[in-house]
Amino acid sequence: MKIIIGSMNQTKVEAVKEVFPSDQVMSYSAESSVSAQPFSDEETRIGAINRAKDCVSMNQDAMGIGLEGGVMDINGQLFLCNWGALVDLKKNVHTASGARILLPKEISEPLRDGIELGDVMDCFAKKQGVRHKEGAIGIFTNDLVSRKNMFLHVVTLLRGQWEYWHESNLKGNDV
Ligand SMILES: O=P(O)(O)OP(=O)(O)OP(=O)(O)OC[C@H]1O[C@@H](n2cnc3c(O)ncnc32)[C@H](O)[C@@H]1O
Ligand SMILES: [Mg+2]
């Protein structure tokens, strides 16, 4: 089976390759068609779906996977949120979200001023390319859960749902 992951970010590409080890995984810089820094669950999820659909529009013989990172507000506090979407050969869509953790004020304030999380994290952690490595989730979990680990869980949720609905020949809520 061919699978296109709609990102060149290695944390996302490696997560898909690990969850689909027997398949041909290709990466493509898909359009999320949402803001570079999504600010709600809804916007982040739509970004993931748009990326997956953009992948499928490139190659009708492949399944598309979109993974999107964002933040969401609960009672004035910002949490990391991540969403994934899988579009299969029949154009059914499955979605799943990732773990979420609170971001400290040092991060949420510059985010609300319009700076992207990846850039804020590099400045905060005094590192380069946190988004391509451990991610904010890695930094704020003391490296116990990396960005790739978090996406591994999301992609596993996508694969499991796709298998369940595919094998049962039924339609899920998302499809
Ligand atoms: O190339 P793409 O696939 O776009 O990968 P990205 O690293 O930009 O990631 P997203 O667009 O999915 O995430 C939206 C923004 O949130 C940032 N972001 C999300 N989760 C992050 C994390 O765990 N660590 C650092 N930055 C993160 C990311 O850098 C972007 O600025
Ligand atoms: Mg991005």
Image: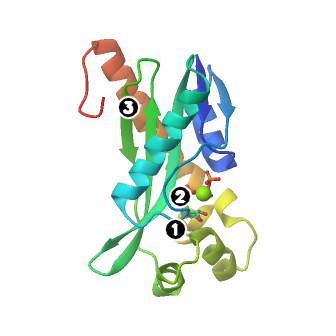
Specify the amino acid type for callout 1.
Answer: Thr
Residue 143 position by quadrant: bottom right
* Helix, strand or loop at mark 3: strand
Residue 22 against residue 127 in the figure, above or below? above
Q: Is residue 44 left or right of residue 58?
A: left
Q: Which callout, 1 or 3, points to the residue nearer the camera?
A: 3
Specify the amino acid type for callout 3.
Answer: Val
For the N terminus, the image quarter is top right
Q: Is residue 132 left or right of residue 73?
A: right
Residue topped by disc 2: 145
- Indicate the position of residue 64 as horizontal and vertical percent values: 53, 31
Q: Which callout, 2 or 3, points to the residue nearer the camera?
A: 3
- Indicate the position of residue 30 as horizontal and vertical percent values: 61, 42
Circles 1 and 2, Cβ within 8 Å, touching? The answer is yes
Judge by depth and name the residue closer to the eye, 171 or 148: 171
Estimate the spatial distance between the alpha carbons at disc 1 and disc 3, rounded to whole Å.
31 Å
Packing grade of label 3 (10 A; few <14, some 14-19, many >=20) is many
* Helix, strand or loop at mark 2: loop
Q: Is residue 156 left or right of residue 12?
A: left
Q: Ligand 1 shows up in which quadrant of the image?
A: bottom right
Residue topped by disc 3: 93
- Which callout, 1 or 3, points at the residue further toward the start of the chain? 3
Q: Residue at x 54, y 84 (%)?
A: 110
Look at the numbered disc 1 and say if its residue's Cβ is closer than 8 Å to ligand 1.
no
Q: Is residue 157 left or right of residue 68?
A: left
Q: Please give the label number shown on residue 141.
A: 1
Is residue 125 visible in the rendered structure shown here? yes
Q: Residue at x 60, y 23 (%)?
A: 59
Residue 41 against residue 152 in the figure, above or below? below
Specify the amino acid type for callout 2.
Answer: Val
* Helix, strand or loop at mark 1: loop
